[in-house]
Image (cartoon, rainbow, N blue to C red):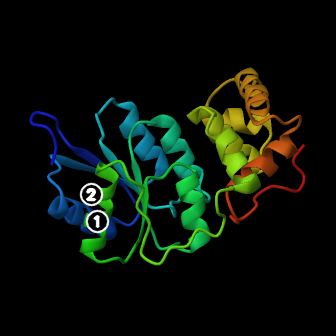
């Protein structure tokens, strides 16, 4: 299914080892991947991508320990914009599927789908199409609303900026962020300035609101008291 001499390498991102193994076996059975890598967190996935490996497909679970809502998808798309991302998640409501596709996912497969569904999804993505499960109806239509606009702006952040924004959403001050990330406080301030410029906001509170809008119904951490 791929050109001779071109290695096919998938990256499965899921924090449940048993499901990670099962999904790897499923992928191996439906396509001729030369290698399937796994990561149990978003940070581990980003670290794998930073090593320069030529990943040809990312399979992502939305429910990761270091991710809220669609943050993981946005950051992976930012880190590897040319690699198609197939979402495999138990959060398969029409609204979530819609937001995931509008945020750049190339397909969405409910987590407990049959192998034949995974095969159709893989073939669709390989053909440059977007795969959605049978019976899916887009509740948003052509307009993504404010959440889509927020996702578009968040996608412009670097991975370090996205990490810092996440800590801001937890209510942490620059000094605490500097400690957590082992960087200088002046570096944090520079990143915060860049984040606000990219998001088109004037304050940390407004930046938190943009992040919350993009997270589509995720728990709103640290919204109160952020200055």
Who is closer to the viewer here, 73 or 188? 73
Measured as percent of width and height from the top left, residue 61 is found at: 45, 61
- For disc 2, the neighbor class at 10 Å (few under 14, some 14 to 19, many from 20) is some
User: In the rendered image, which residue does mark 1 sit on?
Assistant: 120
Q: Secondary structure at mark 2?
A: helix
Q: Secondary structure at mark 1?
A: helix
- Quadrant location, the C terminus: top right
- Residue at point 42% right, 45% down? 44
Q: Is residue 115 above or below residue 191?
A: below
- Residue at point 40% right, 32% down? 50
Residue 6: name its quadrant.
top left
Who is closer to the viewer here, 50 or 179? 50
Measured as percent of width and height from the top left, residue 17 is found at: 33, 65
Residue 215 is tagged as none
Q: Residue furthest left?
A: 4
Q: CA distance from mark 2 to mark 1?
A: 5 Å
Q: Is residue 225 above or below residue 78?
A: below
Measured as percent of width and height from the top left, residue 7 is found at: 17, 38
In this rendering, does residue 68 appear at all? yes
Looking at the image, residue 110 sits to the left or right of residue 191; the answer is left
Q: Is residue 198 above or below residue 213?
A: above
User: In the rendered image, which residue does mark 2 sit on?
Assistant: 123
In this rendering, does residue 11 appear at all? no
- Residue at point 68% right, 64% down? 218
């Amino acid at each position: 299914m791929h050109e001779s001499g071109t290695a096919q390498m998938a990256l499965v991102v899921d924090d449940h080892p048993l499901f990670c193994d099962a999904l790897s076996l499923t992928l191996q059975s439906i396509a001729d991947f030369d290698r399937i890598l796994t990561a149990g967190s978003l940070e581990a996935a980003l670290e794998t991508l930073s090593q320069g490996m030529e990943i040809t497909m990312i399979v992502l679970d939305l429910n990761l320990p270091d991710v809220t809502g669609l943050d993981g998808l946005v950051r992976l798309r930012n880190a590897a914009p040319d690699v198609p991302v197939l979402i495999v998640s138990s959060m398969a409501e029409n609204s979530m599927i819609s937001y995931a596709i509008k945020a750049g996912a190339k397909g969405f497969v409910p987590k407990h789908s049959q192998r034949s569904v995974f095969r159709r999804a893989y073939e669709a993505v390989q053909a440059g199409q977007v795969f959605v499960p049978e019976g899916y109806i887009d509740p948003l239509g052509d307009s993504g609303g404010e959440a889509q606009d927020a996702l578009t702006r968040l996608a412009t952040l670097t991975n370090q900026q996205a990490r810092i924004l996440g800590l801001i959403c937890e209510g942490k001050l620059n000094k605490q962020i500097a400690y957590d990330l082992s960087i200088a406080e002046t570096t944090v301030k520079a990143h915060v300035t860049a984040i606000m410029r990219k998001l088109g906001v004037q304050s940390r509170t407004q930046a938190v609101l943009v992040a919350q809008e993009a997270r589509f119904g995720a728990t709103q951490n640290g919204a109160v008291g952020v200055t």
